[in-house]
Image (spheres, rainbow, N blue to C red):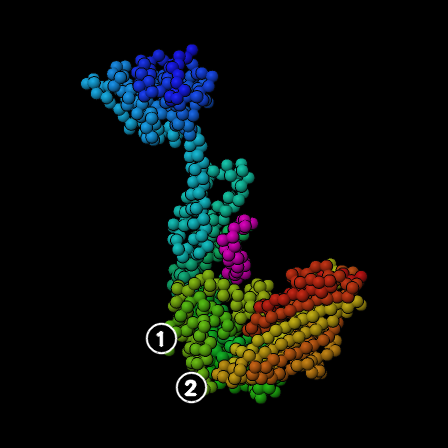
Amino acid sequence: MFKAEVSDERPKAIIIDFGQSAFVKWLKKALKNRDVSVATGRTRPESLAGFDYIFIVDANYQQFERLYPYLNKAYLIFSSKTNDLTKIYKQTVKVKKKFKTVVVLSDFGLDKIVDRVLWFFFSSSSVDFLRIGIDSKGKIKQSFKLDWFRSFIYRFFNRKFLYRLSLFLFVFYNFLIWVSLGLGLYSLKNRFRYISYSYTNSLISFSGSLYNPMRPIYHFFLIGSYSDALLNLAKLSLASYDKVLELKSKTDRFLELFFGVDSSEAELDERYKIYESVLSDIKFIEDNLRLIRSNFWLNIKFMSGVKTQIDEISSSLESLLPVVENLDRILPDKKNKYIVFFANNMELRPGGGFLGSFAIVETKYLGVESLRFYDVYDADGQLKEYVQPPKAIEEYLNQPYWFLRDSNFSPDSLENFEFAKRFLELELGEKDFSGMIVVTVTAIQRLLSAYGDIYLPAYNDKVNAENFYVKTQYYVHKDFFPGSIRKKDFIGDLYNQLIINFEFADKSVLIKELISSLDEKYIVAYFQDEQTQKIFDNLFWSGRMFLPRCFVQIDGNCVPDLVFPVSANLGVNKANYYVKESLKIKVYFEADGRIRKTIDYLIYNTAVETVFLGGNYKNYFRLFLPRGINSEKLYIDGVSSTVDKYLYNSDVLANEYEVIRMYLTVPLNTKKTISLDYYIDKKLQRGRNFYQLVVQKQTGAPNMDLEFEVSSADNITLVNQNFYGVVKNNLVVYNTNLSGDKIFLLEVVKE
């Protein structure tokens, strides 16, 4: 039951006293002195809406809980003996409601402290907790420090805060996992240019140790496979790079031993051990890269460039590994001797380019025992026996003799090897060669890109990939005369500096350019050893001509076809520096099964004036095709001409090819086109057929644009092909680049 002294105009207060506190009497008196109408009681009235001030005294937690939903603003008073003070205070500070709390520490001197309590309640201070009492000397004592601390603890360390804190720690923990992993992957992507290997290793290891406890959670939310793959990708990449660093160190040491003359038994033993270790490392890296590629199903934008690099490296290792495995056959314990020709493909010849200089290399025990450089004119000057030259050399070069410098007049490396062996025996008395390697100017330029500037002390000059050709021509042709050794000396000095500076070369660039030079036939090699030669044949690195045969056993009729354009610059200049070429091949399958072909070949001499390197392009051009073609039309610059056909006069390749030949002069800044229409001898049969077209690239020839177009009659359907072209109705068009030998295979059905 409440007692009330009510005045409609005065502020209204209610005191709900649960503990019969002595302080209530003084509080009531103080409020009245302030002209406040006061009601008191021990229970909540039906409504608290009419009261301006609500005071709750000595409530326990259950009592406060019953009142709490009806309170938006209240003043709480407790004696020091109240047990639920902490619990109630925590309830008041975790919400946006306005509560202030006072704890009265003494039972005497209440008249002295009541005014200060009311001042605290009614003030605008943000402090919401006060302890107040009278000490033994009768002085008022109060404290806010403990209240501030408790207010902070209660306000922030509540259940909601703990949820947020747990979420923050979870997110931050995972953030550390992926930031450390991301930094590790980024440093791998940039080849450790910005972060050291050891630091990258620490980052990825740290990420892995953090991830392991979280792994079950990731898998529970079905994202574990992604995170596992990414972490595995980082670990495999790091392991591969670690092995690459070891491999670099081993190859540097192997090269030192490789060119060691009069090596000791201990050095020979070390050479073989390093070779076995290098072979093992390459296999390890290849296996790891295969696993890395299998993890690249992840669509990670910033790693897309890495995927391309990984694919390139994997492809290079797949090509290189068989050669490295076979190195002990190429460089066996017995003495082997090889010819290395340096071919200037700016003066293009069928076998790669004009043979200006060469080296004879003797090998033994996985190393080089001797290396001798020769100028080709020095060797040719010692020829005492007449050798009948090919008809084109005799007719168009007006040269009645045949020399080593012109011996690579066949587009097939085996024939050129046989010719070279004959000349070397006649001119220098050298014989018993185990193989031949042809290195073109373009290949040397590419390999130099891994070195930067190379200083040649004998010339006090620097050579690099950009200026190599011009510098070579300058120093070789300066005061040139037949028998001059300038070319031999220049190549020899450059070779010595390349070996000296090998440890500073970018090995990844060097391997990449070596592989691309072999793939694009700027370097070719032929070996007497059948097993080695088979490896190079399979890699298309040998410079051999393809026989017009179907390569694979096919269930159905197979029609083999071949197109092989071959040029020989007989203008005694370096016009190929300026020459660009393109090739267009059209194939039409007629209704009766006959196969009609059109070949358009464009030669463009871009030189605009007679300069040191250029001039009119005098080209002895040959087009090798399968036997049995039925030629209808030949056009040169749109003018109809007769087709001069002859069988290729060779013991090795006799009766295999039919050749269209002509001698063309392409003046400065002029284009010349050759167009040929003909039928293939073999027809499509009813049912399933396969058409195989091989387009061969000449050794040393520049990469050219190639367009392949296939169309057919309505009764012939193209079922499948091994290339991606633009398809429209019965027409397929494929544009590519003849950067190496191309093999096109089409499956067609004839009704």
> SS at mark 1?
loop
- The percent position of residue 3, horizontal first and vertical second, equals 39, 12
Q: Which residue is mark 2?
A: 479
**Residue at point 60% right, 78% down?**
603
Residues shaded magenta: 295-324
Pointer 1 residue: 457
Task: Residue at the far left: name it.
Answer: 137
Say left or right for 155 vs 335.
left
Taken as a whole, is the magenta stretch helix, strand or loop? helix
- Dot 2 falls on a residue whose secondary structure is loop
Depth check: give the residue in front, 514 or 431.
514
Q: Residues within 10 Å of mark 2 (few under 14, many from 20)?
A: few
Q: Quadrant of residue 714?
A: bottom right
> What kind of residue is marked 2?
Asp
Residue at image point 68% right, 68% down = 709
Residue 516 location in percent, x, y? 53, 65
Q: Which mark is residue 305?
A: none
The x and y percentages for residue 578 are: 53, 78
Query: Callout 1, which amino acid?
Result: Pro
Expressed as whole percent of the image width and height from the top left, the position of residue 72 reads 43, 25
Report if residue 322 lies within the magenta region: yes
Q: Quadrant of residue 258?
A: bottom left
Task: Using the image, determine if residue 210 lies above or below residue 732.
Answer: above
Does residue 21 appear left or right of residue 591 in this picture?
A: left
Instruction: Tell which circle, 1 or 2, labels the residue nearer the N-terminal end.
Output: 1
Tell me: 457 left or right of 477: left
Q: Is residue 16 visible?
A: no
Q: Is 27 rendered above or below residue 359?
A: above
Dot 1: few (<14), some (14–19), or many (≥20) neighbours within 10 Å? few
